[in-house]
Image (spheres, rainbow, N blue to C red):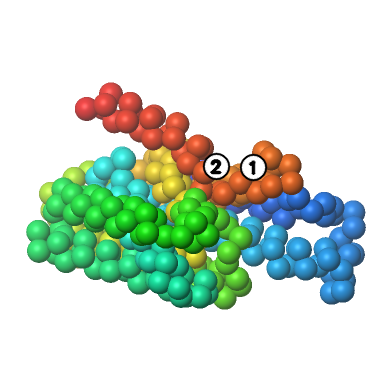
Amino acid sequence: MNNYQKTLSKKRNWIILIIIVAFLLFVVDLFTGPAKINISNINSIFDTTSKENVIFFNLRLPQSLTAIAVGLSLGLCGAVMQTILSNPLASPFTLGISSSASFGASLFLILGFPVIYVTTGALFFSLLATAFVYMIGKKMQMNTYSMVLSGIAIKFLFDSLLSLVQYKASDETLEYIVFWIFGSLNRTNYSQIILIFISFLIAFIYIFKNSWKLTAMRFGEERAMALGVNTKKIKSISLILISIVTAVSVSFCGTIGFIGLSSPHIARKIVGEDQRYYLSMSALIGSVILLISSILSKTIKPGAIIPVGIISSLIGIPFLIYAIIDNKDKG
């Protein structure tokens, strides 16, 4: 076995290891929470008349599955963003998707729509922001800097509109808006979880199929075009896909920050820039980070659940600082 084959084998082993870690964390998350449910009384979990059954299948399992689905989605989106924008500080929220989704949810709440329609408002405005950024990018020949700047403009616009909505909201509505913005895994149902998984799989299949093109882009767009890569096309389609995936995740769970920023950096350190492994690793690490955040959110304060978005941000901040320092050293 030559060195190249050994390197690939090592990368595959890393991916298998992270899958095992994610599964173990998934099991731990299922049995973590204010209500004491142990593996020793597993029979009561499958007793449809018991409270353990309700807690496990109506609360714990959807929450843990959501952590995996959203973690995979944001980890993948962050990796693709950093590749197509050639920016180590890029994340799914660089394009203002999170801010627009938060505004949409808040607007629907203050207008008196039932809570069930809140995710519809979040999804609509996040897709609206995506469409705007895409139109600007297309007009500017998918120029990286133009796309980033338009995303920042969208973010500040919807942040301002969100502040206005909060200012006008009643105390009761404001409390729910703030809780939604913090990010939570316990507001999804099984049909929404399936939708998150489907959107992730569609994006992953297309992006993984074109992973060699993304790898070429990491060495510069000019070099990639010399190899026959249509960089504008791959940017356009990738941007649309990851924006939709992010919009779906944020619409159902609220703002869960830094997953899309920290996961790619960890993945890059482990498997390098080969997108075949980098994309998969980043997605898996995203699920691992969110599962850890979910477990911590239920254990830091006994008897209470801290919004998972707060925990994920605290975990992600050191990676943001590291990314800034690492990028400065390379520059």
Mark 1–mark 2 CB contact (< 8 Å): yes
Dot 1 surroundings within 10 Å: few (below 14), some, or many (20 or more)?
A: some
| Residue positioned 16% across, 60% down in the render | 137
| Residue positioned 42% across, 67% down in the render | 110
| Residue positioned 64% across, 42% down in the render | 296
- Could you say which disc has been placed on residue 311 in the image? 2
The residue that disc 1 covers is 296
Give how far across and how far down residue 38 sits, in percent: 84, 52
Give how far across and how far down residue 201 sits, in percent: 46, 67
Q: Amino acid at mark 2?
A: Ile
Pick the front one: 251 or 223: 251
Classify residue 324 as left or right of residue 319.
left
> Mark 2 falls on what kind of element?
helix
Q: CA distance from mark 1 to mark 2?
A: 7 Å
The quadrant holding residue 74 is bottom left
Pick the front one: 267 or 307: 307
Q: Amino acid at mark 1?
A: Leu
Classify residue 29 as left or right of residue 261.
right
Give the mark nearer the N terminus: 1 vs 2: 1
Dot 2 surroundings within 10 Å: few (below 14), some, or many (20 or more)?
A: many
Does 111 appear above or below 175? Answer: below
